[in-house]
Amino acid sequence: MQPYHLPDQTGHFGQFGGSFVAETLVHALDALRDAYDRYRDDPEFQREFAYELEHYVGRPSPVYHAQRWSEQLGGAQIWLKREDLNHTGAHKVNNCIGQILLARRMGKPRIIAETGAGQHGVAAATVAARYGLECVVYMGSEDVRRQASNVYRMKLLGATVRSVDSGSCTLKDALNEAMRDWVTNVEDTFYIIGTVAGPHPYPLMVRDFQSVIGQECIEQMPRDAGRQPDYVLASVGGGSNAMGIFYPYIDYEQVRLIGIEAAGEGLDSGRHAASLNRGVVGVLHGNRTYLLQDENGQITETHSISAGLDYPGVGPEHAWLKESGRAQYVGITDREALAAFHDCCRIEGIMPALESAHALAYATKLAPTLPRDQIILVNLSGRGDKDMHTVAELSGISL
Ligand SMILES: *Cc1c(COP(=O)(O)O)cnc(C)c1O
């Protein structure tokens, strides 16, 4: 097998990826690509990135043997990569640090971002505060209402939150508005995208910044677990925590990679966010990928218990990994994710993000089918404090 080497010069992963944007953005993306080409292998850039990850984010995050849970399930050993222990409580900050270091080198004093549930907005506002840059976060007015505490967090961190009142007043409308801002203010503005989607070079760049997750696992697993895992599992919204842990393992052919999508009320219910399992190939947010749309080509409303997985597309590299057969993608329902959330709390004393609970739920299905000496490594992408209200509400408890 040839070593994995994608995307190509034009940002393609097979037929997926690329750059489908308005003429006005071509220049901005070219400049970004040139800057990233220049700094990607620059030792000083890499040194600063590593320093920030260690001293600000708190890396490396450990791998943890979920021993009690594995014993109860009676099969393979489940190990967790503890991204929940990062500053701000999830993997998103890794990427935000990388992009803001690039923004500084490009001399851009102003950061913009868009956010749905608010998690990427909080991570962007955090790094903007850390470096004293101006930060504007676009958010659909419906999301502003639903995610009031994250809106307040962003404000405490000094960011301006712009509520977007168009379309369905959610993430995709915030995205359009952020793009409009970028076109207008491209001279002084850097747009931080929060997942492995968008036009080239974002899917490449975000994957590279997040791949610190898998690189650490490759060192940690032989030391702490005795060898590399047999399976690596991660939840897939846009796909950044999954690409982060998958990418360094792609050339380890014996390691199986499994991405877990939000099956919501069921893959055949019409109420889910499983673009790879139920989507069609098309263009969304500047790249060609799998997406959820109706017969008329309209993007459909998605549903998931977990706000972070509630996205109608998926990063183009996952589309490629699926097509090439290197990774496999499955669905986990709201109900299954919720059960895994409760089990993880009670059996391991770890409250997982509902996104991560999807990957955990699949691990609990897989483990009992495997011998005890097999190892399943799950990316625990974030902590669940943010989801307590959702879980309480579903249990009929008001906090
Ligand atoms: C945002 C988020 C996700 C989903 O985003 P990806 O880009 O698919 O990783 C998963 N887990 C947590 C904790 C998140 O905050």
Image (spheres, grey):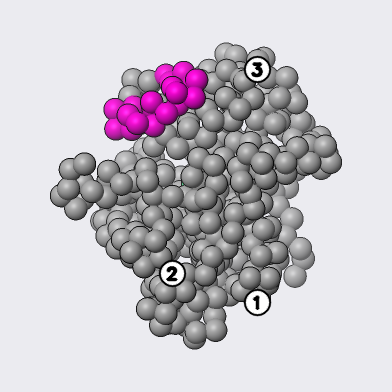
Tell me the quarter of the picture where residue 49 sits. top right
Left or right of 197 in this view: 302: left
Q: Which residues are magenta?
A: 142-162
Left or right of 330 in this view: 205: right
Residue 284 coordinates in the image, percent (x, y):
49, 38
For mark 2, what is the residue?
363
Residue 168 coordinates in the image, percent (x, y):
31, 29
Residue at 49 percent across and 21 percent down: it is: 159
For mark 1, what is the residue?
226
Amino acid type of the residue that numbered disc 3 sits on in the rendered structure: Pro
Crowd rating for badge 1 (residues with CA inside 10 Å; few <14, some 14–19, many 20+): few
Residue at 41 percent across and 82 percent down: it is: 74
Residue at 42 percent across and 79 percent down: it is: 71
The magenta stretch spans residue 158: yes
Q: Is disc 2 placed on a helix, strand or loop?
A: helix
Residue 37 visible from this viewpoint: no
For mark 3, what is the residue?
109
**Which mark is in front, 1 or 2?**
1
Say above or below: 247 vs 255. above
Does the beta carbon of the residue at mark 3 sit less than 8 Å from ligand 1?
A: no
Say above or below: 146 vs 288. above
The N terminus - image quarter: bottom right
Distance of label 3 from label 1 (alpha carbons)? 46 Å
Left or right of 27 in this view: 160: left
**Which mark is in front, 3 or 1?**
1
